[in-house]
């Protein structure tokens, strides 16, 4: 685990030199086909040599829920273990990790009319967040005010069931039946991470990110309220293509949104239990050695 732009994928790939592992992507953006540059998807060469499961499994027009992720990732873990290998999960979608570790309560199915109403309300500044804060302050403290998908789902659950997401989660008896080792790469400081984020976005634009979004834009079946197009970078570029943003605004808003995401990821990690925090190093080999040291100290066969 770790904030965006801290080298998680490179570390996971490097670990394959030392451990008999298979990689599983834990990223809510990497699931989409045709969204490669803006999600910083591993290169074709890296994926050919180091396949990632749960990557490129959905078209951008499709939705993908946390419940689907839980089902899919448990299946992949089971298959890898049957092969006699170790599942290694890598990515920055902290909510997905939380679902894997703690499960989901039985929640009411989505209601299209209610969801459409809440989507319209999302255009009013902070409406969804303020509403959830009144109904379920605990969930509101865990969900970013701009994470419209999760805010809408939390409110939808309350309106359909009469109970908050927090109340329903208390009834969850789920337990993951595996021995888990958790690691997080921690950046040296905020300035370093901000610089890495800006460099990544500049590189993304140089690699042809605008063209990638133009292809999606011209399909005709996608719109900016879809989870795929709400991904950071895609939404900002989409609005630029709609002439709602200048190029400079698109660039600055993408940087701002990415920094907010990184801050949110670090907030998750700050309160995460049973985690081994690894200080960032410029080489994946040194990071891998730090992981191996922890495993060896815990009598994990490497």
Image: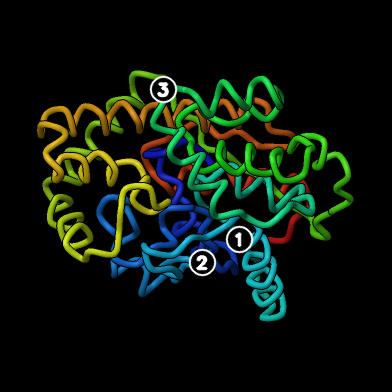
Q: Residues within 10 Å of mark 3 (few under 14, many from 20)?
A: few
Residue at image location 63% in from the left, 71% down from the top:
76
Does dot 3 land on a helix, a strand or a loop? loop
Q: Are marks 2 and 1 in contact (CB under 8 Å)?
A: yes
In the foreground, 14 or 97? 97
Q: Earlier in the sequence, mark 3 or mark 1?
A: 1
Image quadrant assignment for residue 253:
top left
The picture places residue 168, in percent across and down from the top left corner, at 81, 42
Q: Earlier in the sequence, mark 2 or mark 1?
A: 2
Q: CA distance from mark 3 to mark 1?
A: 30 Å
In the foreground, 1 or 283? 1
Q: In this figure, which residue is indicated by the disc labeled 2? A: 54
Q: In this figure, which residue is indicated by the disc labeled 3? A: 125
In the displayed structure image, the side of residue 34 where residue 245 appears, left or right: left
Q: In this figure, which residue is indicated by the disc labeled 1? A: 69
Closer to the camera: disc 3 or disc 1?
3
Q: CA distance from mark 2 to mark 1?
A: 9 Å
The picture places residue 267, in percent across and down from the top left corner, at 57, 25
Q: CA distance from mark 2 to mark 3?
A: 34 Å
In the foreground, 86 or 236? 236
Is 233 placed above or below 223 here?
Answer: above
In the displayed structure image, the side of residue 287 where residue 271 appears, left or right: right
Image quadrant assignment for residue 34:
bottom left
Residue at image location 74% in from the left, 52% down from the top:
107
Does dot 1 land on a helix, a strand or a loop? helix
């Amino acid at each position: 685990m770790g904030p965006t732009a801290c080298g998680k994928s490179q570390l996971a790939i490097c670990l394959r030199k030392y451990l008999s592992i298979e990689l599983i992507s834990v990223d809510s953006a990497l699931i989409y086909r045709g969204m490669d540059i803006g999600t910083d998807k591993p290169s074709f060469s890296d994926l050919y040599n180091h396949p990632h499961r749960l990557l490129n499994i959905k078209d951008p027009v499709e939705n993908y829920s946390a419940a689907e992720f839980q089902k899919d990732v448990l299946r992949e873990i089971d298959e890898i273990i049957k092969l006699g290998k170790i599942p290694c999960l890598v990515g920055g979608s902290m909510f997905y990790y939380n679902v894997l570790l703690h499960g989901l309560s039985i929640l009411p199915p989505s209601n299209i009319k209610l969801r459409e109403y809440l989507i319209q309300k999302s255009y009013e500044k902070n409406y969804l967040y303020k509403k959830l804060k009144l109904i379920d302050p605990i969930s509101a403290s865990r969900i970013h005010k701009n994470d419209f998908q999760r805010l809408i789902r939390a409110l939808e659950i309350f309106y359909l069931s009469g109970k908050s997401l927090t109340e329903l989660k208390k009834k969850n008896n789920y337990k993951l039946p595996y021995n888990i080792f958790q690691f997080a790469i921690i950046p040296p400081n905020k300035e370093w991470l901000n610089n890495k984020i800006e460099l990544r976005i500049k590189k993304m634009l140089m690699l042809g990110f605008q063209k990638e979004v133009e292809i999606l834009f011209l399909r005709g079946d996608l719109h900016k309220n879809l989870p795929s197009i709400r991904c950071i970078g895609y939404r900002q570029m989409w609005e630029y293509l709609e002439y709602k943003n200048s190029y400079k605004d698109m660039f600055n808003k993408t940087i701002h949104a990415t920094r907010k995401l990184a801050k949110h990821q670090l907030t998750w990690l700050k309160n995460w239990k049973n985690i081994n925090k690894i200080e960032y190093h410029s080489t994946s080999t040194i990071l891998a050695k730090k992981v191996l040291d922890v495993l060896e100290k815990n009598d994990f066969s490497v």
